[in-house]
């Protein structure tokens, strides 16, 4: 049986349970997912030469890390060529590109320092999302930035955040796509603090000062992201889940951003998505794969990844949730890691969209839990792989693992020459 015949058969089987796979494929092609630049160079960026600091780290030293903007862009293009679906570019402020002999500290960044990224994105018909970089900088004092008791330290980082608002609006105007700007800091303490509220009140005031920068709320979507702990700040983080969610709920136009690695091990973001959708018109996700802690492993087509996609789709929230990948694995081929993660999230979205969600909800509301269980189990063995193959065919990429041959060739011809 040919691939086309297999898809025709799968299409018929899904149609019997009310799913139009042609319509699903057409819709998924138009749903943007942000692809993060920092997988390609281990979150180092281009504005400093030192190691990662501020509560995060990468592990591994696989050869071929991108060292320049040109190398990072080339690697990004390779990922684009191997993955289906619509992309956005997700940048950190530390990826500013300076002309020879030029430098601007983070509080002095301007749109011109990202002009090459804008040109890159526009040539590929992509929008850009943005993140102020509150880590890996000498002006982090005692593990603190926006929540520091030192007013000058706070002022520097507030000015950085305000600069990023201006840059985000520039991105949106240039690309014609709203820019999601995410505020996250690793501010915290290694051991038990004497004052938990003080740092949070300073953090609250700092974010409010950042958001006081004038901007078009249709163009810039500011978010606040929580975290349980970080390396060197294990006992306390100022931006806890309760803090960031309360901030977003009480500040108009500010979105909550959930990273599924930033919660306690027994919490799942898939359950939080529908809860937040009851109250927020929009929300944002950073999609990763935690193992025991916020370890930022490559996203796989695993249970929680599928559950998060299900909750977005079954609640008709594909236009309400801003989706972005966020992981950085330096122990394996970085381009392959990028590709696997993006393809995995695409699979999860496609599978969720091929689920007869309306019928399943109806069974639940009718209290017919016996048939609900039966249908939920039966749909697991439907020929989803044939729909995936058709989606990839229409997007012009390989549906099976044959794409990896391109990675191996790229490693031999390009990555292995980076010393």
Image (tube, helix red, strand yellow):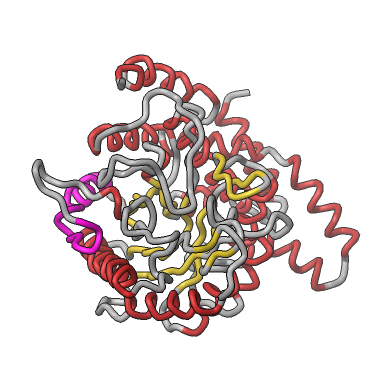
Q: Look at 37% across and 70% down and name the residue there.
A: 221
Please tell me in which quadrant of the rendered image residue 264 appears: bottom right
- Find the residue positioned furthest to the left: 101
User: What residue range appears in magenta?
Assistant: 105-124
Please tell me in which quadrant of the rendered image residue 160 appears: bottom left
Task: Check the image and report above or below for 392 versus 64.
Answer: below
Q: Which percent across, then down, holds residue 217?
A: 32, 76
Side of 340 where 136 appears, left or right: left
Q: Look at 83% across and 59% down and name the residue there.
A: 372
Q: Which percent across, then down, holds residue 186?
A: 47, 59
Let me know if residue 394 is in the magenta part.
Answer: no
Task: Check the image and report above or below for 97 versus 152.
Answer: above
- Find the residue positioned furthest to the right: 370
Q: Pick whichever, 167 or 25, lies toward us.
A: 167
> Magenta: predominant secondary structure element?
helix
Q: Which percent across, then down, holds residue 85?
A: 44, 45
Let me know if residue 106 is in the magenta part.
Answer: yes
């Amino acid at each position: 049986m040919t691939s086309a015949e297999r898809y025709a058969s799968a299409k018929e089987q899904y149609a019997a349970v009310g799913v139009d796979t042609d319509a699903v494929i057409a819709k998924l092609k138009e749903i943007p997912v942000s692809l993060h630049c920092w997988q390609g160079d281990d979150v180092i960026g281009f504005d400093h030469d030192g190691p990662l600091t501020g509560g995060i780290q990468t592990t591994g030293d696989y050869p071929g890390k991108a060292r320049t903007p040109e190398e990072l862009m080339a690697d990004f293009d390779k990922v684009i060529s191997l993955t289906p679906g619509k992309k956005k570019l997700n940048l950190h402020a530390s990826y500013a590109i300076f002309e020879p002999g030029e430098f601007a500290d983070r509080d002095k960044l301007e749109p011109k320092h990202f002009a090459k990224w804008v040109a890159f994105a526009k040539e590929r018909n992509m929008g850009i999302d943005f993140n102020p970089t509150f880590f890996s900088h000498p002006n982090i004092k005692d593990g603190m930035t926006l929540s520091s008791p030192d007013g000058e330290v706070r002022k520097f980082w507030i000015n950085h955040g305000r600069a990023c608002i201006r840059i985000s609006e520039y991105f949106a105007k240039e690309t014609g796509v709203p820019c999601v700007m995410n505020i996250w800091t690793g501010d915290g303490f290694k051991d038990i603090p004497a004052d938990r509220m003080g740092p949070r009140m300073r953090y609250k005031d700092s974010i409010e000062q950042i958001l006081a920068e004038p901007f078009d709320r249709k163009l810039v979507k500011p978010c606040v992201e929580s975290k349980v702990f970080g390396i060197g700040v294990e006992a306390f983080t100022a931006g806890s889940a309760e803090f960031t969610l309360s901030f977003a709920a009480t500040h108009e136009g500010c979105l909550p951003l959930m990273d599924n690695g930033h919660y306690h091990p027994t919490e799942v973001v898939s359950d939080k998505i529908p809860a937040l959708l009851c109250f927020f018109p929009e929300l944002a996700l950073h999609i990763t794969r935690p193992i025991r802690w916020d370890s930022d492993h490559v996203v796989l087509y695993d249970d929680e990844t599928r559950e998060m996609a299900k909750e977005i789709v079954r609640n008709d929230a594909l236009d309400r949730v801003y989706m972005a990948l966020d992981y950085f694995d330096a122990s394996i081929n970085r381009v392959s890691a990028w590709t696997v993660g993006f393809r995995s999230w695409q699979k999860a979205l496609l599978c969720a969209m091929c689920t007869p969600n309306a019928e399943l909800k109806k069974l639940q509301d009718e209290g017919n839990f016996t048939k609900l269980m039966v249908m939920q189990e039966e749909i697991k063995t439907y020929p989803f792989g044939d729909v995936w193959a058709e989606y990839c065919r229409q997007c012009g990429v390989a549906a099976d693992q044959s794409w990896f041959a391109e990675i191996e060739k790229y490693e031999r011809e390009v990555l292995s020459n980076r010393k």
